[in-house]
Amino acid sequence: MNFQDKRVTVMGLGRFGGGLGVTKWLLTQGAKVLLTDSASESALALQLDKLGTHANLQIVFGSHRMEDFTDTDVVVVNPAVPMPWANTYLQAAWGAGVCVTTEIELVAMQLDRQNVIGVTGTSGKSTTASMMHAALCSAGKRCRLAGNIGGSLLGEITTILEDEIVVLELSSAMLWWLDKNGGWSPSIAVLTTIEPNHIDWHGSFEAYKTCKKLLFAYQVEGDISLTQDQGATFGGLTVLGKHNECNAAVAFLAVIAAGADPDLARAGIQQFRGLPHRLEFVRQGYYNDSKSTTPSATKLAVDSFDDPSKVHLIVGGYDKQVDLRALAEQANRVANMYAIGATQNEIAELATCPVDCFASLASAVAAAKQNMVEGDVLLLSPGCASWDQFENYEQRGNLFCKLVREVSPTR
């Protein structure tokens, strides 16, 4: 797609900079970009500072205007926009015959799909993708890690070498958009797990499951499809948890399929030290699993410890309209459960053991520290998104790390 002198509306810079990369790239392509975001200018100050100014850039804050979606050549949507099929502005754009696309489609259009490993799933997709990247690097393969794991690949497209492998993490929303505009699948496709999640975006669990499976929908003869084996084992890992053995096993199969040397790939996976906010070791007895945003992810985190009865567990957060019973059930296994955020009352009501509710993460950490004895562990594994009290799971996890590092040891 040639964007020279095209009028392009970018819907959503986002507090996390979701539209930052695509806006910068469009400007380098000669497009006349109108960036529109319902948030205020002050709320987006950090992202705007990174974006800078440009003669071909216009920004509208605080609301969207209908004419920006109908009187334009292209609309580029942030995938975070929920239920796009029902969005008034996008409906108007489609009705006016305007091309509506996303950053991930612009990336996929320019990649050689034969050199792409695509990864999706409810839990483990970032860790699995990162394990693949570590394995490929260990095996001496040129590779890049991109997609939902953060940052846009658009600005790097022209520097990708012919034999370079791209490991692309894909969200359910990204897959919906890729399907909407004609469909795309990678040559090697990996699905980790599917559990109820993002019902607020998709409208139902069935719709969410359908989107996850779209990763395989446009593969052709000779392509490779892999799903995670829940009984798989993988020895010698640095990271904790049976679930990470499953992540490692499917990552290993994928990189072998991509031509990596098995011994070197295995060594790379074994040396992988994990990602921030995913069962991250903070200090002795303290673990940050803020990326846990589903009940099943919390269960996996608790399962990673030899004795769950020694675990003090902090849960709760934004309500994504998923069933929280599996999260509440963890109260039966752990030493104490501490609930925060919008879902705290629901968790406490569903639990058959006492759950202590707190107004803030800081107060929950303080209470847990008072209750802990020698050999206990404090685990932040919320099982819920962070958006009720935090901008993102990173902010939540960073605060937890700060709080536990400030607490003086009592053991």
Image (spheres, rainbow, N blue to C red):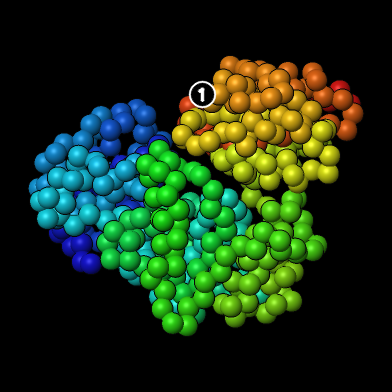
User: Measuring 88% from the left and 33% from the top, which residue is drawn there?
Assistant: 375
Labels in figure, total? 1
Q: From the viewer's perspective, is residue 114 above or below residue 177?
A: below
User: What residue did someone put label 1 on?
Assistant: 342
User: Measuring 34% from the left and 70% from the top, which residue is drawn there?
Assistant: 110
Q: Is residue 230 left or right of residue 14?
A: right
Q: From the viewer's perspective, is residue 89 above or below residue 115?
A: above
SS for dot 1? loop
Q: Is residue 49 left or right of residue 323?
A: left
Which image quarter holds the C terminus?
top right
Category of crowding for the residue at label 1, using alpha-carbon neighbours closer than 10 angstroms: few (below 14), some (14–19), many (at least 20): some
Residues 331 and 285: in front is: 331
Which image quarter holds the N terminus?
bottom left
Q: Residue 31, how many percent across, how many down?
A: 20, 56
**The quarter of the displayed image where residue 213 is located:** bottom left
Q: Residue 161, how many percent across, how many down?
A: 46, 76
Q: Residue 291, how many percent across, how many down?
A: 59, 42
Residue that sits furthest to the bottom in the current view = 222
**The quarter of the displayed image where residue 74 is located:** bottom left
Q: Which amino acid type is shown beneath numbered disc 1?
A: Ala
User: Measuring 72% from the left and 23% from the top, which residue is drawn there?
Assistant: 353
Q: Is residue 356 left or right of residue 91?
A: right
Residue 51 visible somewhere in the drawing: no
Q: Is residue 3 left or right of residue 387?
A: left
Q: Residue 321, how many percent across, how many down?
A: 46, 34
User: Measuring 57% from the left and 41% from the top, which residue is drawn there?
Assistant: 294
Residues 15 and 301: in front is: 301
Residue 220 visible somewhere in the drawing: yes
Q: From the viewer's perspective, is residue 96 above or below residue 37?
A: below
